[in-house]
Amino acid sequence: MVVRRSFLGAACAAALAVLGCGGDKSGSSTGGPAPSGGPAAAAPKPGKELVLFAWSEFIPDAVIQGFTKETGVTVLYETYSSNEEMLSKLLAGATAYDLIMPSEYTVEALLKQNKLEALDPANVPNLKNVDPAMRGFPHDPELKYCAPYMAGTVGIVVNTDKVKDPIKGYKDVFQAKYKGRIVVVNDAREMVAWALATQGIGPNDLTKDTLEKARPVLADWVKLVKVFDSDSPKTALLNGDVDLGVIWSGEAAILYEQDKKFAFVLPEEGSHLYIDNLCVPTGAKNKLGAEMFINYVLRPEVSKLISDKFPYTNPNAEAKKLLSDAQRANPASYALVN
């Protein structure tokens, strides 16, 4: 079973509470036509700096350097490790950022708070490259506010040299015999969704009663986990510190590329697709620069560079054509969309 992820507002806050943790100024003007008989309007120019607030280990240095070389715009890259961290800063009034990378449920939350600027289609013509399969989602069905950057899921990684019993789902991972041998993403919302899935409850069915059902499951699971890591959960597996992981699919894809002993499993209880997007927050001082960066990233050859470094599910149909057969066949990268 695959479900589309869409956690929102109070529901997300309630989910986080189960574990007791968390995680109109538009900048450059496009200008209008010059008065009849007058000189042509000067083309707008981006600001000299672009402040990017995005996930860690997700944007290759080559992409940032290539954009700066081409445009002269210096990119200041600040990172976060959860949507909640980014959201709390924006809702608290942070205005330093020109470009952010929220997941789809966070896009919905930001739009409800009027915290995103609409994109100027004239500045982002490469939106045409977005795969039709990655369009029409509830968070932004017409891509008015954001561009899909990468997509993925959370799945199970098994070191088959160490774990010989069949692993098909969350219940197989979280067993007492694997205590101290498990890494999971440090994301309370995700773990709540997994616990609900073992009860046959969907990730959006968050009520007081369903969360009470998830609570004892989570209480048992957390005792078994050795490492909580959202930034680089693959590291503990590569180092041999753990033998099982419930981690981001892109991290799992890197493990599979490096050593085929790291098998990827979609949990039989169910999984969900997430989409990380590039969006311009309200108050951005360099909106034009942000739109130029989005358009640059949506070039097929640039988007391919991202997949080469971080092999998540690429939502760019033209970029996907440039990937090797091995990249497209990676079970973690395209588990939900092949």
Image (tube, rainbow, N blue to C red):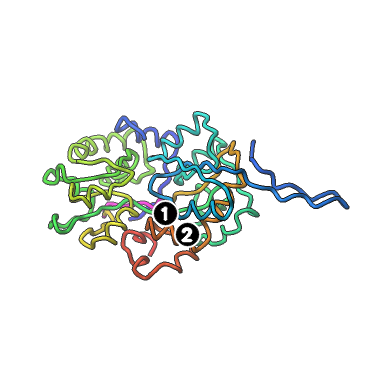
Mark 2 lies on residue: 303
Instruction: Give the foreground label among 2 and 1.
Output: 2
- Residues drawn in magenta: 268-274
Where is residue 277? Give x, y as percent.
48, 49
Tell me if residue 264 can be seen. Answer: yes
Helix, strand, or loop for circle 2? helix
Q: Residues within 10 Å of mark 1 (few under 14, many from 20)?
A: many
Tell me if residue 172 can be seen. Answer: no
Q: Residues within 10 Å of mark 2 (few under 14, many from 20)?
A: many
Magenta-span inclusion, residue 273: yes
Magenta-span inclusion, residue 159: no
Where is residue 70? Give x, y as percent.
57, 55
Q: Nearer the viewer, residue 101 or 310?
A: 310
Q: What residue is shown at x 60% (from left), y 38% (from top)?
A: 285
Where is residue 330? Give x, y as percent.
32, 64
Q: Nearer the viewer, residue 328 or 266?
A: 328
Instruction: Determine whether, in the image, residue 137 is placed left or right of residue 240.
Output: right
Where is residue 32? Give x, y as percent.
76, 48
Cα–Cα span, label 2 and label 1: 12 Å
Mark number for residue 151?
1
Mark number for residue 47?
none
Looking at marks 2 and 1 on the same chain, the residue that comes earlier in the sequence is marked by: 1
* Extreme-bottom residue of the structure: 325
Q: What residue is shown at x 17% (from left), y 58% (from top)?
A: 160
Q: What kind of residue is marked 1? A: Ala
Helix, strand, or loop for circle 1? strand
Quick one: quadrant of the C terminus?
Answer: bottom left
Q: What kind of residue is marked 2? A: Ser
* Extreme-left residue of the structure: 177
Q: What residue is shown at x 59% (from left), y 36% (from top)?
A: 283
Instruction: Determine whether, in the image, residue 27 is placed left or right of residue 264.
Output: right
* Extreme-right residue of the structure: 37
